[in-house]
Amino acid sequence: MKILVLDFRIYSIEYEIFEMPRCGEICRGVLEHIGFEQSVLTHCYGNQTKKIAGDIYNHTEGLKFILDTLESGKYISSRDEIFAVGHRVIHGGWSFTSSVIVNNDVKKEIYNDFLIAPIHNPYNFMGIEAAEKLLPGKPNVAVFDTSFHQTMPEVAYRYALPERIFNEYKIRKYGFHGISHKYVSERTAKMLNKKSANIISLHLGAGSSICAIKKGKSIETSMGFTPIEGLVMTNRPGDIDAGVLLYLLKRGWSAEELNSCINKESGVCGISGISDGMKEVVEAAESGNEKAELALDIFVYHIRKYLGSYYFLLGGDVDAISFTGGIGDNSPFIRRRILAGYEKFGIKIDSSLNKGIIGVEGRINSSKSKIKIFVLPKNEKVVIAKETLKLITK
């Protein structure tokens, strides 16, 4: 059976069709620049890629454009061939500890979390409504980025705030990138020939997070109530004294200015003054740009700080460290800097293997390393497809 996986974002829609239960990819793509003068659909089938331009003014039109492309290209014989639709939903709040089949109550809860996840949940919600309109009668499944972290103990997810704030506003650590960390957990265990394993998962991209996984379960992660907390990222500052924000408010900054600063203008981009693209910053650093070098040093420093913390949270019993995400997959330079000097902890990277793994799956640890080190291109959509199949065939 064919399952369509969708990830609706502010200006784009990512999609992939899987033949289930064998998890075979039929095709995938992304429609970008929705609402701008000209949108572009990049569609991939096997090793072939083609681009199709169109004027797409909203997300429902965008999904129709994608479905029309799939039908006209004979990737599906008709829309009826799609058995179900799986959706990536960023925030499940308190309500959802696992994936669910969408109904009106589920949609209401996703809507209620707009305030917590204003950049993502509204568009995830649009995706569900667009699929309901254009694929009537097909089951829709919501797979939440926060669900994987619901196994964290209370000592990990509670902030040291008054009880009334926790109860009234549901303020706690939720964690994100859960679908990606779940994939890393399962795939790494398989590569280790284990049912489950103790893993430190590093999702490094535009948004970055680290997760301590014990026997296949998340026990701690760096992102918190929002995706801002934790590691330094390309545009976000990561951990920051809340007093800084209060100080800026007292100096006359508005909430909107603060939001723009901490979500768009900070992190590696803010320090380097160059770009939010890691490749450009690395190239500048290698050319002697001091601000770029400082930005990379800070980025790596905070990852190493968390890595050490999670190593001890797992009691030193770590089977593997796995890298994923656009930076984790594609930057041997960053991976090497993160793991340098950890030989005494049984972590030793193989330089030649590391250089050869860019955008593909592979092992990069030395034969002398007690802890395995893997690079795993992110594959969140296959997790969504599996979760969708599991729920609709119960």
Image (cartoon, grey):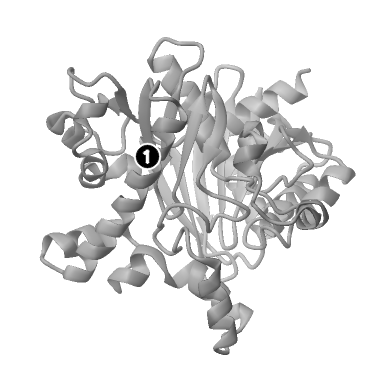
User: Image height check: is 232 above or below 332?
Assistant: below
Q: Residues within 10 Å of mark 1 (few under 14, many from 20)?
A: many
Q: Position of residue 385 (x, y in %)?
A: 62, 29
User: Image check: 330 left or right of 87?
Assistant: left
Q: How many marks?
A: 1
Which corner quadrant holds the C terminus? top right
Instruction: Depth check: give the residue in front, 339 or 118.
Output: 339
Residue beneath the point at 47% across and 58% down: 239
Instruction: Depth check: give the residue in front, 168 or 5.
Output: 168
Q: Quadrant of residue 242?
A: bottom right
Residue beneath the point at 39% across and 60% down: 234
User: Image height check: is 296 above or below 382?
Assistant: below
Residue beneath the point at 41% across and 39% down: 309
Q: Quadrant of residue 216?
A: top right
Q: Under tag 1, what secondary structure? A: helix
Instruction: Depth check: give the residue in front, 308 or 333.
Output: 308
Q: Quadrant of residue 201?
A: top left
- Residue that extends furthest to the bottom in the rendered view of this protein: 252
User: Image height check: is 145 above or below 268?
Assistant: above
Residue beneath the point at 22% across and 45% down: 337
Q: Is residue 58 visible?
A: yes
Q: Which residue is mark 1?
A: 307
